[in-house]
Image (cartoon, coloured by chain):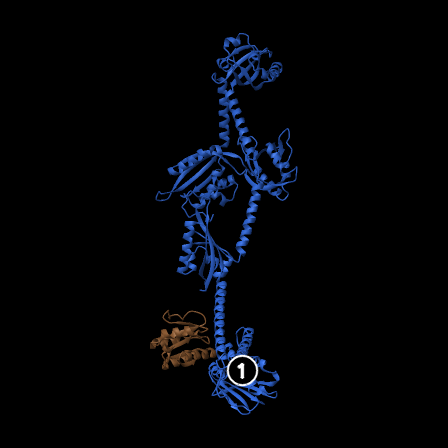
Chain colours: A brown, B blue
């Protein structure tokens, strides 16, 4: 997975244990984790701040949806993937946005990142 | 009188009335519309009704049937002519008597000469008319006597030998004058079957002069038979001694044949009516008795009689006690006032006491010629019809009850979607009054797209028949959306053509809402399961690190899984609502030592489920560490957990401290494992605050400073 080495990944995930796990996975892939952000406001702030190449957005953040972060990223032309245990991508985001299913699988995560990488 | 229109009368109004009222003849004034605007006293008296009723009275009702056609035709023609016209006919007065009235109607004109109606006057000409009729009758009789062409004359001696005959007699009897006068007797040409009746009469007229009239048959020379009506009287010499008998003979063969035919047709009619179950009866209003048809006895359950007559009282006795008064009253009104009746009533049959329903019609027949009035009636058994009617009524009532009380919505419409009936459930659900619904199009109760769905289904039924079942959204009066499942079908007439539509609807609003709620729950459950699996995945990853020996890793994993599970238990008990922070901490600590080793102190805050899981996992990690390296690794070790609401600058915050005491001297770990990470980063992120672990020599301390968690009151 040397292809992903050095990729800076913004992680927005509200479940601490899951966020940690994702962080470990990314580390194993040679990526750098930005965040993780567990709340919508924090995630939005990080997204606006930049300094990352791609983003992984948990759709459901403690009852809020991460759609505003996705819109901000799209506005800035930054690639991102949604992560969700269940359900479809939020309205307005079609097939071009990869979906990463929870529980995570390392291979799926790597594929998604490879697609997103600029 | 106030109803009289303000029309000019021919003379001063009061004067006219006074004159008219004192006139012995009936006087009336009609308007252009043929309504009477005035009638006088004699007019009112003839009818025997009130003045107002007399104005409105339809005089056609009282014209004698024999005169009606002619009088009506002449009256119509007369009115149309706008000229003077006269009518003559018999009218029944208040006493039921037929009176001959001769009326003259003269046109009325206003000052400009315009026709404005008629003034009529009617004279009672009954007496004159009767006299005229009597005269006419006598004249007819006389002329019959003297007319050779009508009556035959025959004279016989006291032995019956013909002594004189005219041509007409020869013609009637069918024998030549020569043959008759050549010694034949009237006994010879009389039909043998009639002789037994004839001879005693003949002997009596010869013996004491008693005249007689009778009908008998002659046997003609050609063998033919002729019926004659003979009026017979004795002829005496001037001395008074009888020398012969004179007979005036009329040929009544034709009349007899007619009567026969009539009898036969009456018989046929009787048989027909009896076959139709119609019993007939007559009543002589003097004796209150009359002939009953055989099936009338059957109908009333009475035995047949040799003389098939029955009485009024016998009939009334059979009427059901509850109906008897009504029956008697209707019959009496008919007898006395000539008012025909049609009644339906119950009888109790004589032979078996069975109750039956009869329908009876009765009329009084008035001859108008002095003969007494008679009564004729027909009755038939309508029990089956009544029963069917009753069943229908009950069935209708049952359906009506279902219609009224059904929870389902019952609706009928015309083929152009107009509502013709709705049951109360519809009114209740949709919020419009019944009169606001009936006659309106179903389009008025739904949005256009829904109407299109309905029309589509309607057209399908028109083309293919059958019924349709669809879900329609309707609009209640208050704007609420109602979701109905509607089954509908076309009503067909006997020829199979659609004539209407009926629909049964059921409210699916609640069901749809419940369905949506259930879907939401399933989605949520799925989300939680996936989330929990992700957490388990994370815990597994942290537990099974390469540098941890498998047995230890397994134990750590099980412990963490148990903590997660325990937190879930509490959440499930609380239906994934807010949970008690104290309970979460207690549950997480329980596997790690006796409750006496823990001192928990703080307000009972409520926290969100997600926060509860993170807190439970963090407490688990702290306690696990305490068991391995800290206070709980020594019997005398204790742990205090304190928390409180803190107010910093008006914002409520949570301050929580975990303090260990009585353990071995604390040594800060060289590397930070999952536990530390979970507590310092995971819990901090979850709470949105800071969590700090201090490895103080006399005991580990963990300090939480965070905004008061969402849901904590």
- Quick check: B603 above or below B364? below
Q: In this view, does B337 lie to the left or right of A95?
A: right
- Quick check: B27 above or below B614? above
- Quick check: B95 above or below B131? below
* Viewer-closest of A41 and B120: A41
Q: Is residue B59 visible?
A: yes
Within 10 Å of disc 1 (Cα), the crowding (few <14, some 14-19, many 20+) is many
Residue at screen point 48% across, 70% down: B524
Place of residue B466 in the rendered image (x, y in percent of width and height, measured from the top left): 45, 50
* Viewer-closest of B361 and B397: B397
Place of residue B517 in the rendered image (x, y in percent of width and height, measured from the top left): 49, 67
Q: Is residue B357 left or right of residue A25?
A: right
Place of residue B54 in the rendered image (x, y in percent of width and height, measured from the top left): 49, 43
Residue at screen point 52% across, 9% down: B179
Q: Which chain carries label 1?
A: B
Query: Circle 1 — which element?
Result: helix
What residue is shown with label 1?
A: B619
Q: Is residue B252 visible?
A: no
Place of residue B238 in the rendered image (x, y in percent of width and height, measured from the top left): 58, 11
Determine which quarter of the picture holds residue B282.
top right
* Viewer-closest of B170 and B221: B221
- Quick check: A94 above or below B279? below
């Amino acid at each position: 997975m040397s292809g992903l080495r050095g990729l800076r990944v913004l992680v927005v995930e509200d479940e601490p244990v899951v966020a940690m796990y994702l962080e470990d996975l990314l580390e194993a892939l040679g990526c750098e984790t930005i965040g993780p952000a567990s709340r919508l406001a924090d995630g939005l702030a990080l997204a606006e701040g930049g300094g990352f190449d791609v983003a992984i957005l948990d759709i459901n953040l403690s009852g809020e949806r991460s759609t505003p972060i996705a819109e901000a990223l799209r506005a800035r032309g930054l690639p991102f993937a949604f992560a969700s245990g269940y359900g479809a991508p939020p309205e307005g985001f079609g097939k071009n946005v990869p979906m990463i299913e929870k529980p995570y699988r390392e291979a799926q995560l790597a594929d998604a990142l490879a697609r997103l990488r600029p | 009188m106030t109803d009289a229109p303000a029309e000019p009368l021919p003379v001063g109004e009061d004067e006219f009335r006074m004159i008219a009222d004192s006139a012995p003849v009936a006087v009336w004034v009609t308007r252009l519309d043929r309504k009477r605007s005035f009638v006088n006293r004699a007019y009112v008296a003839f009818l025997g009704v009130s003045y107002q009723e007399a104005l409105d009275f339809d005089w056609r009702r009282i014209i004698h049937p024999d005169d009606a056609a002619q009088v009506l035709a002449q009256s119509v023609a007369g009115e149309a002519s706008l000229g003077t016209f006269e009518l003559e006919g018999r009218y029944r007065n208040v006493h039921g008597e037929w009176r001959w009235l001769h009326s003259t109607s003269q046109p009325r004109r206003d000052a400009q000469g315009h026709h404005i109606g008629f003034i009529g006057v009617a004279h009672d000409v009954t007496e004159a008319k009767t006299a005229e009729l009597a005269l006419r009758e006598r004249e007819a009789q006389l002329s019959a006597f003297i007319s050779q062409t009508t009556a035959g004359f025959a004279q016989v001696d006291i032995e019956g030998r013909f002594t004189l005959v005219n041509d007409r007699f020869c013609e009637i009897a069918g024998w030549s004058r020569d043959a008759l006068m050549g010694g034949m007797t009237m006994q010879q040409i009389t039909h043998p079957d009639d002789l037994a009746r004839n001879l005693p009469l003949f002997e009596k007229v010869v013996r004491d002069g008693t005249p007689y009239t009778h009908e008998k048959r002659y046997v003609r020379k050609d063998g033919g038979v002729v019926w004659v009506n003979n009026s017979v009287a004795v002829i005496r010499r001037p001395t008074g001694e009888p020398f012969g008998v004179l007979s005036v003979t009329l040929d009544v063969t034709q009349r007899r044949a007619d009567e026969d035919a009539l009898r036969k047709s009456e018989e046929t009619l009787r048989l027909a009516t009896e076959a139709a179950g119609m019993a007939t009866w007559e009543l002589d209003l003097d004796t209150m008795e009359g002939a009953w048809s055989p099936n009338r006895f059957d109908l009333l359950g009475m035995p047949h009689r040799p003389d098939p007559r029955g009485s009024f009282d016998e009939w009334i006795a059979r009427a059901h006690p509850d109906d008897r008064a009504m029956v008697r009253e209707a019959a009496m009104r008919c007898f006395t006032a000539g008012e025909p009746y049609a009644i339906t009533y119950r009888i109790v049959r004589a032979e078996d006491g069975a109750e039956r329903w009869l329908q009876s019609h009765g009329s009084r027949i008035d001859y108008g010629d002095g003969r007494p009035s008679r009564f004729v009636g027909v009755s038939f058994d309508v029990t089956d019809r009544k029963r069917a009617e009753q069943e229908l009524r009950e069935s209708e009532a049952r359906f009506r009850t279902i219609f009224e009380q059904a929870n389902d919505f019952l609706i009928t419409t015309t083929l152009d979607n107009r509502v013709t009936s709705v049951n109360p459930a519809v009114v209740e659900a949709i919020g419009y009054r019944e009169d606001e619904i009936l006659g309106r199009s179903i389009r008025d109760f739904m949005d256009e797209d829904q109407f299109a769905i309905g029309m589509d289904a309607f057209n399908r039924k028109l083309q293919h028949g059958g019924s349709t079942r669809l879900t329609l959204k309707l609009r209640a009066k208050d704007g609420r959306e109602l979701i109905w499942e509607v089954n509908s079908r076309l009503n067909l007439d006997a020829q199979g053509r659609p004539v209407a539509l009926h629909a049964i609807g059921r409210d699916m609003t609640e069901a749809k809402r419940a369905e949506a709620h259930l879907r939401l729950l399933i989605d949520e459950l799925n989300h939680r399961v996936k989330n929990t699996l992700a957490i388990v995945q994370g815990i597994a990853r942290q537990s099974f690190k390469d540098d941890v020996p498998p047995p230890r890793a397994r134990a750590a994993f099980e412990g963490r899984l148990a903590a997660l599970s325990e937190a879930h238990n509490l959440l499930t008990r609380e239906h994934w609502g807010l949970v008690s922070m104290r309970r979460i901490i207690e549950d997480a600590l329980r596997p790690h030592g006796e409750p006496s080793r823990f001192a928990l102190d703080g307000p009972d805050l409520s926290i969100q489920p997600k926060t509860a899981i993170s807190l439970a996992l963090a407490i688990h990690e702290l306690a696990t560490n305490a068991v391995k390296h800290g206070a709980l690794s020594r019997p005398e070790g204790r742990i205090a957990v304190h928390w409180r609401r803190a107010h910093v600058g008006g914002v409520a915050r949570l301050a929580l401290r975990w303090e260990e005491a009585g353990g071995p001297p604390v040594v800060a770990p060289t590397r930070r494992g999952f536990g530390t990470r979970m507590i310092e980063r995971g819990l901090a992120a979850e709470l949105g605050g800071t969590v700090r672990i201090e490895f103080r020599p006399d005991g580990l301390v963990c300090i939480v400073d965070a905004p008061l968690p969402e849901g904590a009151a």
